[in-house]
Amino acid sequence: MAASFFNNKARAAAVAAAGSSKSKAGDSKEDSTRLQPWVEKYRPKSLDDVAAQEHTTKVLQRTLQASNLPHMLFYGPPGTGKTSTILALAKSLFGPALYRSRILELNASDERGIGIVRDKVKNFARAQLSQPTGLDAAYRAQYPCPPFKIIILDEADSMTQDAQSALRRTMETYSRITRFCLVCNYVTRIIEPLASRCSKFRFKMLDNSAAGSRIANIAEQEGLELEDGVVDTLIRCGEGDLRRAITYLQSAARLVGASNGPAKDADDDAEMTDAGSSRVITIRSIEEIAGVVPESIVESLVQAMQPVSGGSAYEAVSKVITDIVADGWSATQILGQLYTRVVFSEAIPDIQKNKIVMLFSEMDKRLVDGSDEHLSMLDLALRVAGILQGN
Amino acid sequence: MALLVDKLRPRTLDALSYHPELSDRLRSLAQSGDFPHLLVYGPSGAGKKTRIIATLKELYGPGVEKIKIDARVFQTTSNRKLEFNIVSSVYHMEITPADVGNYDRVVVQELLKEVAQTQQVDMGAKQRFKVVVINEADHLTRDAQAALRRTMEKYSPNLRLILLANSTSNIIAPIRSRCLLVRVAAPTEVDICSALSVAGKKEGWTESEVLNQRIAKESGRNLRRALLMFESIYAQNEKVTDKTPIPPPDWEALVTLTADEILAERSPARLLQVRARLYDLLTHCIPPTTILKTLTFKLVARVDDALKSDVIKWSAFYEHRIKLGSKVIFHLEAFVAKFMRIYESYLMGMDF
C-alpha cells in the first residue's frame, strides 16, 4: 500500500519534472488536487475558458465591463457549462476576497422549500453590502467588484412551484443590491413570472470539435496517452455532455494508471521505461466504463431476431436475452443500441421500421416505469422478430 | 448454525472465485488511494455485495467487519418522524433509503451531509474518506437522486459513495456520469459448479459432478440460489446420487401446480381456483413480479411456438400494469384470464 502510494507520487513528480523542477511544497499541493474530480479541477477559471458558448460569453463579457448585470436564467442540456459559466463570471467579478460574502449558491442538495426561500434567500438578498476593507488598488483594478450580491439557484427546475412564486417579489424588491441567477435544464419548469423577470441564455449542445479539443487538452495536462479515436469515442459516449466525457476519461485513467501500480513496485527504473507504453487508454476501456454493450452481443441479438423458416424465433431470442440479463447489461443501453441498429439498417423496409419504432417508444416508457427488464426485453425482441417476419 | 451462503462467503478480494479481472481492478482502485464513487450493478446473486465488502476490507483492513446497527429518527418537513436503520462500522456506513419510501430524500440529504461534513475520526485509518454504501439505489426516488448530485461533487474529499443496483435504467444520468460503473455479471454455470464442489469438499459431503451441473442449470446463474439448493438437497437426503431430485422451493412448486391447472381447464370456475392460489402466494410475500414471471415461463414452455410471443407480450403488458397499479391481484388475474382466452381460441382454431 505505502509502496505504491510513493510510487504514484514519484510518477506524478516525473511528469511534472518535464516542465520544471518542482519544489516540495508543490508536491503536497499535487496530492490534494489529485483527489479532486477533474470536472472540478478543470472547471473554467474565467469566461474566456468556457468552451463553445460564444454568444452567451460575449454578452456576459460586456456586462462584466459595464459592471452591471440583469437577473439571469441559464438553461440547456446537462454538461454544457451553465454552472461553470456563472461561477467563472462570479469569480472574475469579485475575486477570491469578496467571493464568500457576495455569493450565495443553493442547489438541489440543499433544502429549498418555500421556508428556505422566505428565510435564507430573503435574508441574504436583503442584507446590506459589506464594505470591502483592506483591498488594495491592484485588486480593484483586476476585479470590478460591482455593488451587488449574486444568488445562484442551481438546478432550479427541481424547486417547487410555491418556492418559485415566493421568489417573485423578492427578486424585484431587492434588485438594487442583489441579482439572481437561475440555472436549469428545462426552462418550461420555471414558472412564467420568474422567467419573464430574467434575461434568458440558452446553452447549446457542445459541438464535437470544441469538446474534443477540451478533452485533448485535459489529457495532455494529465499526461495521459490515448489510443487513436479515444477522443471521438468519449464524445460519442458522452452524447454532448462534456462533464460525462471528462468523468469517463478520469475513470479510465484511474483504471489504467492504478492497475499498473501494484504490479511492479519493486523496480523504479523499470517502471519509468515502460510506464508510457502501459498507460495507454483504449477505446474498449472507455466503452466498458460507459456501460456500452459490446457490438458482438447486439449482433447476436439481431441475428436471433431474423426470421427463420417454419418456426418461431422464440428459442433463439429467449436464449440470447437470458444471457444478456444474467450478464447484467442495462436494458436501456441495449434498447438504445438496438434502436440505432434497426433504424439505420438498409435491409428493413420503411413500413416495418414504422411499426418497430413504435415498439421502442412503448418499451422505453415501460422501463422508465420500472417494469421487469427481462420480460420487457423479451417482449420487445419477440415483437420485433414478429414484425420482421411480416405479420 | 449459519447457512452455507453466509459461512462460505468470501471475506477478501483474494478469496473471490470468479471474475478475476474485476477483482484485480477493484483491488488496484482500493490501493491507489484515489477511490472513485462506484455504481455497482448486476443481477441478484451475482456477488455484488460480497465484492463490495471485500473491497472495503481491502481499503480499511479488518475494522470494517465490526459492525453495529443504529436506529436513527429523522423528521420530515411535515413533522413526521421516520425511523431508519443504519448499519455502520468506524469506517463505513450502509443504508437502504428505499426503506422509507417517498421520504428517502430527507434521509439522503441529512444523513449524507452529516457524514460528509465530519472528517474521519480515527487518525490511524488508512483512508481519509468514509464510505457510504447505498443499497437498492435503483429504488431511490428522483428527488433523492437529484439531492445526491451536488453532494457527490462537493464533499468528495470526505465521502465516497458506493451505490448498489440491479440495473442502471432507473438511475438518473447525472448520477451515472459521476460514478465509475462496475458491472458484476452473474457467474457462469461452470463457475457455479466449481463453487459448489469447493463448498461440498469443505463440508465433507460426497460429491456428484452431474448433480452439481443440474443445480447450476436450475439456479439460473444465481450463486446464492444454487448454494441454498445444494444445501437443502444434502439436508434432505441421506445419500446423494446423480439422480437425486432437486426439490424446488415451495412457492415455485405452487406456481408449477397453478400452471398445470390453467393448462388443464380454461373456465371461470378454474379462474376462481387460480385466484385462491395467487392470493396464497401473495400472502406469503412472494413479489408479484416474481409470481408473474415464473408463471409465464412455466406456461410458455408448454404451449405451441405460435403462441409464445403472444403470451410474453401480455405478460410484459400486465407486469407493467402491476408496477403502475396499486392492487396486484387484478393484474395477475387479468393475465391468467388473458392467457386462458388466447390458449382456448388457439385450441378451438378461431378468434373470439
Image: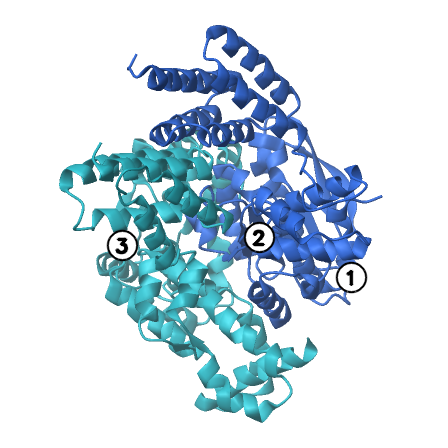
The circle drawn on residue A390 is: none
- Residue at the image position 48 percent from the left and 56 percent from the top: B178
Q: Which mark is residue A205?
A: 3
Residue at mark 2 shares a chain with residue at mark 1: yes
**In this rendering, the label closer to the viewer, 3 or 2:** 2
Q: Residue at x 71, y 60 (%)?
A: B120
Q: Amino acid at mark 2?
A: Glu
The mark closer to the camera, 3 or 1, is 1
On the image, numbered disc 2 is attached to which residue?
B189
User: Which residue is located at x 63 percent, y 84 percent?
Assistant: A265
Q: Earlier in the sequence, mark 2 or mark 1?
A: 1
Disc 3: CA contacts within 10 A as few (<14), some (14-19) or many (>=20):
some
Looking at the rendered structure, the secondary structure element under dot 2 is helix
Residue B341 at x, y percent in the picture: 38, 15
Q: Is residue B188 above or below residue A270?
A: above
**Badge number at residue B62:** 1
B181 lies above or below A330: below
Q: Residues within 10 Å of mark 1 (few under 14, many from 20)?
A: few
**Residue at mark 2 to residue at mark 1: CA–CA distance:** 32 Å
Name above or below for residue A31 compared with residue B133.
Answer: below
Q: Colour of chain B?
A: blue
Q: Is residue B296 visible?
A: yes
Mark whose residue sits in front, 2 or 1: 2
Q: Position of residue A92 (x, y in %)?
A: 38, 64
Residue A43 in the image, given as x and y percentages of width and height: 41, 64
Q: Are marks 3 and 1 on the same chain?
A: no
**Rendered image quadrant of residue A383:** top left
- Quadrant of the image for the C terminus of chain A? top left
Amino acid type, residue under disc 1 in the picture: Pro
The amino acid sitting under disc 3 is: Met
